[in-house]
Image (cartoon, rainbow, N blue to C red):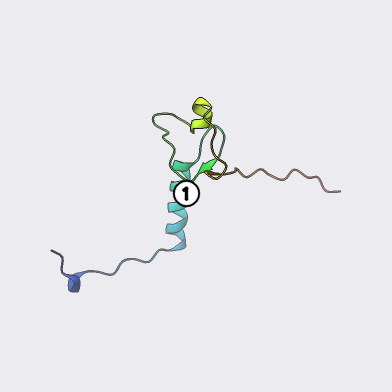
Amino acid sequence: MYRIDLAKPKLPMTLAKEAALDAATAARQTCGTCGRRYFHCIPLKTLGSCLECYDGTPAGPTSYIAPLVPDHRLAA
């Protein structure tokens, strides 16, 4: 079906491509309400948020990455 000898080599993954891919994936995996990034894509078109924010179904702590909370400690 395809001739291997005429195939062009695959372009390597650069840091810019990897950052763009991670940003696009993060947009699909992050809940807009609570800010949690899940390991799966959230159905934003149908639900608009994760299940826990939508109807209260508890999410397992191993199914998401906790949002980064800035450190508010004052200098002593």
Q: Quadrant of the N terminus?
A: bottom left
Q: Give the farthest residue toward the top.
A: 55
Q: Give the farthest residue toward the right.
A: 76
In front of the other: 55 or 23: 55
Name the residue at 75% across, 43% down: 72
Relative to 60, residue 6 above or below: below
Relative to 60, residue 23 above or below: below
Please provide percent x and percent y for residue 63. 52, 43
Q: Which residue carries the number 1 mark?
A: 23
Please provide percent x and percent y for residue 71. 72, 45
Relative to 33, residue 65 above or below: below
Q: What is the tally of numbered marks visible in this picture?
A: 1
Given the image, on which type of amino acid does mark 1 rest?
Answer: Ala
Please provide percent x and percent y for residue 49. 48, 32
Label 1 CA crowd tier, 10 Å (few <14, some 14–19, many 20+): few
Q: Give the farthest residue toward the left.
A: 1
Helix or strand or loop: what does disc 1 sit on?
helix
Name the residue at 47% across, 55% down: 19
Name the residue at 42% across, 33% down: 44
In front of the other: 16 or 69: 69
Image quarter of residue 13: bottom left
Please provide percent x and percent y for residue 54. 49, 27
